[in-house]
Amino acid sequence: MKLYITPTSPYARMTRILIIEKQLEDRVDIIGAQTRVPASAYYGINPSGRVPYLVRDDGVGMEDSALICSYFDHLDGNPEFDLPAGDEIWEYKRLEALARSLLDGLSVWGRELSRPEEDRSPTIIAHERARSERMLDLWEKVVQHPLLLADLNMMQITLVCALQLEKLNPQFEWCAGHPNLCAWEIVLANRRSIAETVPPPMT
């Protein structure tokens, strides 16, 4: 299989974490994709130009991090990252949506900072900074939730990928003032799949 990524994409990172967790390193080739440039050859592989994008062994392509992660999880017939059973599913989905909201907002902020300085929108940056501050205060209150302390799950992966975007955005300084969340992130950061997929520092 071929997985197309960019090294700074947190969504692609989630799929790379699953590759390690499910021991698929020998089955998946990770390929850097050139995105957001005119006439990239990658657009002939994935017309949307987004990452991650998986080309399966049968040649069929799959876009979307959640879909690809679920596919990787089920390949061995022993899924470990499925949704919980019973009524707990709604609490899990609630928390996962909050984690995705933080990640999505930080991604918008990061994309804005990647533009030439004269093209950046101060309004968007201020909006996403304020959103992240509110979300971080919320996560500080709920980080001791049993689902955040349970075995690794996709909600936790989403949240840690969001928090570690600080490595790409020096303006996103979240640890100070959030001791519980910071302690939680430190524990997860030592897990091999998390440590080996940390985004490269901003140059």
Image (cartoon, rainbow, N blue to C red):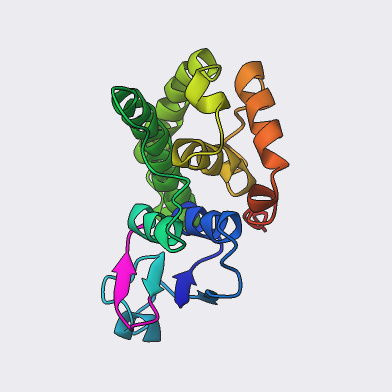
Apparent side of residue 88 relative to residue 178 in the rendered image (left or right)? left
Magenta: main secondary structure equals loop
* Image spot of residue 152 (x, y percent): 55, 38
Q: Residue at x 52, y 74 (%)?
A: 28
Quarter holding residue 165:
top right
* Image spot of residue 117 (x, y percent): 48, 53
Apparent side of residue 127 relative to residue 163 in the rendered image (left or right)? left
Q: Quadrant of the C terminus?
A: bottom right
Residue 36 visible? The answer is no
Looking at the image, the residue that sits furthest to the front is: 77
Q: Nearer the viewer, residue 47 or 183?
A: 183
* Image spot of residue 58 (x, y percent): 34, 83
Give the vertical position of 173 relative to 145 (above or below). Answer: below
Q: Residue at x 46, y 78 (%)?
A: 2
Q: Nearer the viewer, residue 10 or 66?
A: 66
* Image spot of residue 36 (x, y percent): 38, 70
Apparent side of residue 43 relative to residue 150 in the rendered image (left or right)? left
Looking at the image, the residue that sits furthest to the right is: 190
Quarter holding residue 20:
bottom right
Give the vertical position of 150 relative to 179 (above or below). Answer: below
Q: Which residues are magenta?
A: 56-64
Apparent side of residue 51 relative to residue 174 in the rendered image (left or right)? left
Residue 123 visible? The answer is yes
Give the vertical position of 61 relative to 172 (above or below). Answer: below
- Taking the magenta stretch, the answer to whether it contains residue 87 is no
- Total labels drawn: 0
Q: Residue at x 51, y 20 (%)?
A: 146
Give the vertical position of 166 relative to 85 (above or below). Answer: below
